[in-house]
Image (cartoon, rainbow, N blue to C red):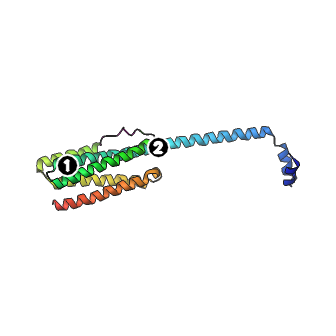
Amino acid sequence: MNQFMMLLLPDKKLRRNLKSFNILNLYKIKKQIERLLTSIINNFNLNTMESNKEVISDLNSLVTILNDGKQGYESAAETTDSLELKAVFGKYALERAAYAAELKAHIKQHGGNEDDNDNGGLLGAVHRTWIDVKQAFAGNDNKAILDAILTGEKSAIEKYDGYIADYTDHADHLALLQKQRDGIQTDLKQIEALKLQNS
């Protein structure tokens, strides 16, 4: 240790400890730091992988709901004779497809396969079947079609609300989820207004 350093360290005990501090001690400390950093990085990677799997699963769940909505609107557009309702249902079917595409982009960012989820789920199939059966027995019952759509849209909003509340896992796309949820809510209000007109 040079004399300049000794002048900066007035405490004799500290100077003595620094003199005895040698390369071997530095090597041991370096190895301990490397082990610690490796452990931290491994834990971070495991946590990140688990978090990404959960995010991918959550987003895939929303894509399924959006696909259900799209298919439900397409089925409703085919079922109704109302030109006004056909136009509204067609518009919302396209909107759900666009929402699904946005979420698939985030799925890809998190390491998922964006092409894994192009279909709806069981609940959507049940709603579409219900619309078809109701239409077969009731004739062209726009109120029944709108009731089925309202049920599906309320279910979608509940799902979005659950994921938005879990903002920790969804922080990087929270604004997108909120925007889509608000869009579905706006559509729900219009469907409610259309139901009143068709009562």
| Residue 9 appears anywhere in the view | no
Q: Residues within 10 Å of mark 1 (few under 14, many from 20)?
A: many
Q: Secondary structure at mark 1?
A: helix
Percent across and percent down for residue 140 are 12, 51
Looking at numbered disc 1 in the image, what kind of residue is underneath it?
A: Ala
Q: Quadrant of residue 43?
A: top right
For the point 34% across and 40% down, the residue is 117
Looking at numbered disc 2 in the image, what kind of residue is underneath it?
A: Asn
For the point 31% across and 46% down, the residue is 97
Horizontal placement of 51 versus 35: left or right?
left
Horizontal placement of 181 versus 72: left or right?
right
| Residue 160 appears anywhere in the view | yes
Magenta range is 113-120
Give above or below for 104 relative to 166: above
Give above or below for 191 relative to 2: below
Which residue is the site of mark 1? Answer: 77
Horizontal placement of 130 versus 184: left or right?
left
Q: Quadrant of residue 120?
A: top left
Give above or below for 159 relative to 24: below
Q: Please check the rendered image and state whether residue 115 is part of the magenta-colored stretch, yes or no.
A: yes
Total label count? 2
Specify the label residue 52 is tagged with.
Answer: 2
For the point 34% across and 58% down, the residue is 182
Which residue occupies the foreground of this view, 84 or 36? Answer: 84
Q: Earlier in the sequence, mark 2 or mark 1?
A: 2
Percent across and percent down for residue 73 are 24, 49
